Amino acid sequence: LLKFLPPRTDGPFYFRYYTHRLRGASWVVCPKLSFKEKAPCPMCALGDRLFRNQNDPDDVAKGKSLYRRETFIANIINVRKPDEGVKVLRFGINLKKALLEFFSDEDEEGEEGGGVDITDPKNGSYVRIKSERNKGGWIDHMASTRKDGNAGMPYAKWAKDLIDLEALVKSTLMKSDDLKELLAEMAIDEADASEEKKGEEEEEEEEEELFPEPIKKLCSKHNLPARYSDYNKRWKCKKC
């Protein structure tokens, strides 16, 4: 059960950006579309080039898997665990549309809902999100409200602790050279990996989750994209 929080400034309660999904749960932010950077995005360039090679089904599939995904984040509070404070929820376009249906006003993109402002600190609603796999094998997100119109704020310091969503995403940006290095590593992994199960298209899946730690640093030993290891107290790549 979640309480979605109002924005820090005027605008929608969420921040929209674009990501490239990598193998597993890893992802990187697309700098070109997310922040209109002048430098080309290596992920976009490779994905487009592979997808245009219609003579090779494998290249088309790889290109599709690298395609940028519209992604959203929002400040939330877990109503069941309010003492944990403000957290950031990451979700996709389907859940975003479901959430907007609760609103009676148009959002910045002209989309209309019809009901209640789920972010209102005093008179909003709590939101329950349920995910189910439909007959086609894809994930459906069903959002429902609880305590319509009288759901107070479960965490008193929410306004002070609101997270700057745009700054959070910008802190995860990788430089163009680092993205190219990551692509080179992916090519090595692809050569060593076995063929994935037919019909398993992970890029189409969409799940909501707390904002994860993306790949955004380089390993000091191998100079490859890495994640922070709490055990080793340093950034480690796959070769470590």
Image (cartoon, rainbow, N blue to C red):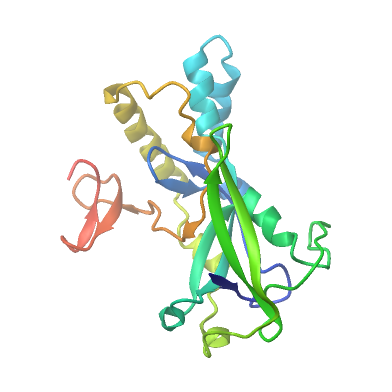
- Where residue 205 appears, x then y in whole percent? 52, 40
Q: Is residue 43 above or below residue 142?
A: above
**Residue 125 sits in quarter:** bottom right
Q: On the picture, is 171 further left or further right than 138?
A: left
Q: Is residue 3 visible?
A: yes
Residue in the picture at 54% in, 87% down: 160
Residue in the picture at 45% in, 58% down: 172
Which of the pair 30/129 is nearer the observer? 129
Q: Which one is in front, 164 or 102?
A: 102
In the image, is residue 187 above or below residue 97? above
Residue 237, position as x, y percentages in the image = 25, 46
Spot the residue most to the top: 55
Name the residue nearer the viewer: 91 or 16.
91
Residue 11: % across, % down: 73, 70
As drawn, is 229 to the left or to the right of 107?
left
Which corner quadrant holds the C terminus?
Answer: top left
